[in-house]
Every structure is written in C-alpha cells, then in structure tokens.
Image (cartoon, rainbow, N blue to C red):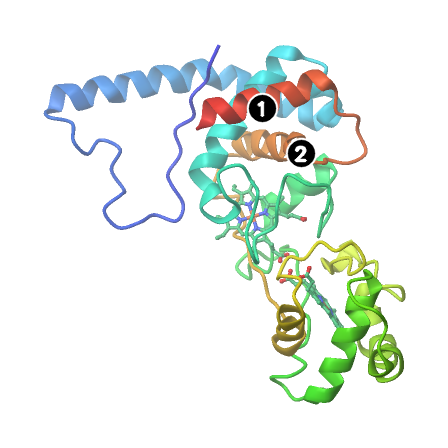
Amino acid sequence: MIYWVFMPAWPALPGMDGHTRGLRDHSERANVAAAVAELEASRAPMFTRLTEAANTGGISAIEADADLLSFALAAGSSAFGDNCATCHGAGGQGAIGYPNLNDDVWLWGGSFDEIRHTLHVGIRWESNPDTRFSQMPSYGRDELLSREEISAVTDYVMTLSDMIEPTEAGQTTGAEIFDFQCSACHGANGMGDRTQGAPNLTDQEWLYGGTRDQIYNTIWRGPYGMMPAWEGRLDEEVITALAAYVYLLGGGESETITEASAADVINAREAGR
Ligand code: HEC
Ligand code: HEC
C-alpha cells in the first residue's frame, strides 16, 4: 500500500506554486481535487494512529506495528521530498552547512524525541520562542582573536581528530585559547555539547568542511546555521512522520533499529524518488 502526501513545497519557488499547472480544464482540476480529498480522508486515521503511538510509546510503538511503520516511512519520505530535500538533499545526505541526516552524528540530539523537538521549534529560528539556540562568536570578524591566534587554534582543532601532527603554535597558544575560549561550548576535550548544538571536533566529521582553510574560516566568522520551525507550517501528524523517517534514515539513537525497518527505509526512499 502506498500513501501519498500532498504538501506545499518549501521554499516556494516562483512559477512552481501550482501542481495543477498544465491541467487543461476545470473538470480535470475538479477530478484532481476530488482525488486529493479522497486520499486525505483515507490517510487521516493512519496519521491519528501514528501520532497516538508516538505520544504514548515513542518510536518503539511505531516500529512494533508493521502497518504504522510503513505508513510513517511512506508519509515521512514524501513530506521529506517536498519540504526538506531542498536543503538536506534528496536522500538526506546534506551538504556544507546542511547536516547529513543519514549518519549517527547529531548536533542537537538523535533520539526520536529530540529530532521531533528540533523539527517543532527549528534552529536559530527567532520567530519561534522555543527555538534551539546558541551562537559561536565571530572570532576574526569581531577581532576577538588575531590571525596568528586563529591559525594556532586551527592547528590545535585539527590535532583533536588527528588530521595533522601537533605543531608548536597549536600545542601552546592554540591549546591555551581552546581552553579559555572554546571549551565552554565544545567541551574540554572537544567532544561537543548537544545542549548548545556545538559539534564534536574530534570525529573528522565536518559540517562546514574539514580543510585547513575551511576550519580557519569557520572560526573566523562563527557559523550560524538556521532551520525553519515546522510547527504551524506542517501538521503535527506530518512532523511526527518526518521525525520517524529521519530517525530511521540514519543512526537514530537509543532504540534498536531492526533489519526490517532498515529495509523499509530503503524501500520508502526508492518510492519517494
Ligand atoms: C532552509 C533549509 C532547511 C530546510 C528546508 C530544512 N532544514 Fe533541517 N537543517 C537545516 C540546517 C542549516 C540545519 C543545521 C542547523 C545547525 O547548524 O544547527 C538543520 C538541522 C536539522 C536537524 C538537526 C540535525 C542534528 O544533527 O541535530 C534535523 C533533524 C533536520 N534538520 C531535519 C529536517 C527536516 C525533517 C526537514 C523538512 C521538514 C528540514 N530539516 C528542512 C536546514 C534546513
Ligand atoms: C558559545 C558557544 C561556542 C563557542 C564559545 C565556540 N563555539 Fe565553535 N561552534 C559552536 C556551535 C553552536 C557550532 C555550530 C554552529 C552551526 O551549526 O551553525 C560551532 C562550530 C564550530 C566549528 C565547525 C565544526 C564543523 O563540524 O564544521 C569549529 C571548527 C569550531 N566551532 C571551533 C571553535 C573554536 C576553535 C572555538 C574557540 C576559539 C569555538 N568554536 C568556540 C559553539 C561555540
């Protein structure tokens, strides 16, 4: 059984706002409207069941129910294509500045509940009062550190994940700066802090690129990645389906992902293409 979910595209591109574009006459348009209404009606009870399961038993309640699981994946995959792929890529693989959602690296948390919360409130989305928020200083632009100091702390950061051999400047000036300026967010040993969305700097996974120049520039400018809040923009049920889809897409945390659910994700992804 395949469920289709009709959602407005985000961001709305000029000239792309009409899925009825190209339909020849009124009756054809009316047929489409009727078909959409019928699908809306047939998927409504499944969406209700999904949200109830998520609210009472979390992701394990969804995984335990094969129908619910395939519904969540189909609905989630379809809504992902319409709302998320523009930034995160069609398969959620990400790009510079846009996190890969397939891996087990999480900025703000990879449990089903954390993902769902991130979707609700967005990230640095100031019109949502509860949005996830933190701000790394712009060390170069705001002249908090000199070029030499940024260079030294770049060396130090790169040694944290064994990307370069330790340097003199990195181990002295760089280490000292890290201790004073960076460890409050990234942790004393650079492992990051999810309560602040501060990435782990020891894992060779780079949101903003891992060359020396890219890391230097990141420290220079202080990144400020933003994601829209989806509550109010998408129905609660759709957000729940998306959270389940994203959770199952990659290394969702604290629950076991069964082989069966992994296969479902792959199928849903193919169907969503
Ligand atoms: C306009 C671009 C944009 C769109 C559209 C978008 N995202 Fe994001 N998303 C981002 C950015 C940028 C971040 C990283 C923010 C940061 O640096 O903390 C992010 C972060 C996330 C995270 C947190 C990842 C983590 O490691 O904690 C999740 C989950 C997520 N997005 C899912 C989605 C889903 C699902 C959708 C579709 C409903 C979506 N995103 C749509 C830009 C976008
Ligand atoms: C107030 C908290 C805070 C402080 C202080 C801070 N950072 Fe960050 N840092 C962050 C956050 C949050 C991000 C991710 C921003 C985003 O997702 O857009 C980040 C991202 C980074 C990245 C990019 C990692 C990647 O995966 O691409 C590097 C490198 C980095 N910080 C290094 C430093 C260094 C070096 C210092 C000290 C000189 C420092 N940070 C101080 C919060 C902080």
Horizontal side, residue 37 vs residue 273: left or right: left
Q: Position of residue 180 (x, y in %)?
A: 85, 79
Neighbourhood count class around disc 2 (C-alpha, 10 Å): few under 14, some 14–19, many 20 upward: many
Q: Is residue 22 left or right of residue 262?
A: left
Mark number, residue 247:
2
Front residue of this view, candidates 84 and 105 = 105
Classify residue 240 as left or right of residue 258.
left
Q: Amino acid at mark 1?
A: Ile
Whether residue 144 can be seen here: no
Q: Residue 66 lies in what quarter of the image?
A: top right
In this figure, what is the number of numbered marks?
2
Name the image quarter holding residue 175.
Answer: bottom right
Q: Where is residue 41? Give x, y as percent.
A: 41, 16
Distance from Cα at disc 1 to Cα at disc 2: 13 Å
Name the residue type under label 2. Answer: Tyr
Residue at x 77% of width, y 63% of height: 163
Question: Could you tell me which residue is drawn at 60 percent across and 84 percent down?
Answer: 141
As drawn, 72 above or below 141: above
Does residue 80 appear to the left or right of 29 in the view shown?
Answer: right
* Res 73 visible: yes
Where is residue 214, by image quadrant?
Answer: bottom right
Q: Secondary structure at mark 1?
A: helix
Above or below, comparing residue 123 to residue 144 in the picture:
above
Q: Which-is-in-front pick, marks 1 and 2?
A: 1
Which residue is tagged 1?
266
Check disc 2 and report its element: helix, strand or loop. Answer: helix
In the displayed orientation, state which residue is furthest to the left: 25
Residue drawn at x 72%, y 81% is 151
